[in-house]
Amino acid sequence: PTPKKQKMSPDTAAKSDNEADAKVASLEYDPNNPLVSLPPDALTAVLCRSPSSDHDALRRSCKTIRSTLESGAYASERVATGYSEVSVRHISKEELWQEDFGQDKEHDPTSEEYDAEESARRKEEQMAESFSDFGRLDESYGYHDITFDVQVDGRCRGSIHL
């Protein structure tokens, strides 16, 4: 038995034709936005060559570029072509102190227990006892715990503790 064809009203047929035309039109060249008119693989290839400092501005430009920049294909292409930018940043003793002690009530200005002068004095003591210019200080073992953030394309991807 052959399947029966559904009867379409002229309005329904016109609507389906318009949807098909819209799909084709979205893949056609748009002179107002030529970059987004590229096929996805070509757009990925073009964007992977842009510096990571431009990525935030590119993400805000349109949904197509944002989704391309956040795709796994883009990250893979950027690594494979050697365009990914890797940087390492030393974490200062002030940042480490903030991580270790900054959330205590005695250092929180909104806390009832907060005293600005006392808080500053305790911070200086804690930093002198527990931190050096390299990082966390461990007197019992006689070494410095040095911390680095690893960033790929401007985004923190991990830390290294030495």
Image: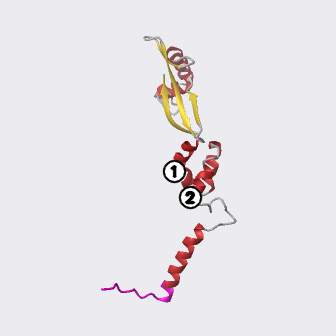
Amino acid type of disc 1? Ala
Q: Which mark is residue 73?
A: 1
Q: Is residue 6 magenta?
A: yes
Q: Residue 159, position in %: x, y?
A: 49, 31
Amino acid type of disc 2? Pro
Tell me the residue at 61%/50% (across/down): 47
Q: Image quarter for residue 120?
A: top right
The magenta segment is: 1-12
Q: Residue 129, position in %: x, y?
A: 50, 14
Q: Which residue is mark 2?
A: 40
Q: Is residue 42 left or right of residue 158?
A: right
Q: Residue 17, position in %: x, y?
A: 53, 80
Q: Along the line of sight, which residue is nearer the eye, 29 or 98? A: 29
SS category of the residue bearing label 1: helix
Q: Which residue, as the protein is rendered here, is positioned at the far right? A: 31
Q: Which mark is residue 60?
A: none
Check disc 1: other Cα within 10 Å, few if <14, some if 14-19, many if 20+: some
Q: Is residue 110 magenta?
A: no
Disc 1 + disc 2, Cβ < 8 Å: yes
Give the mark count. 2
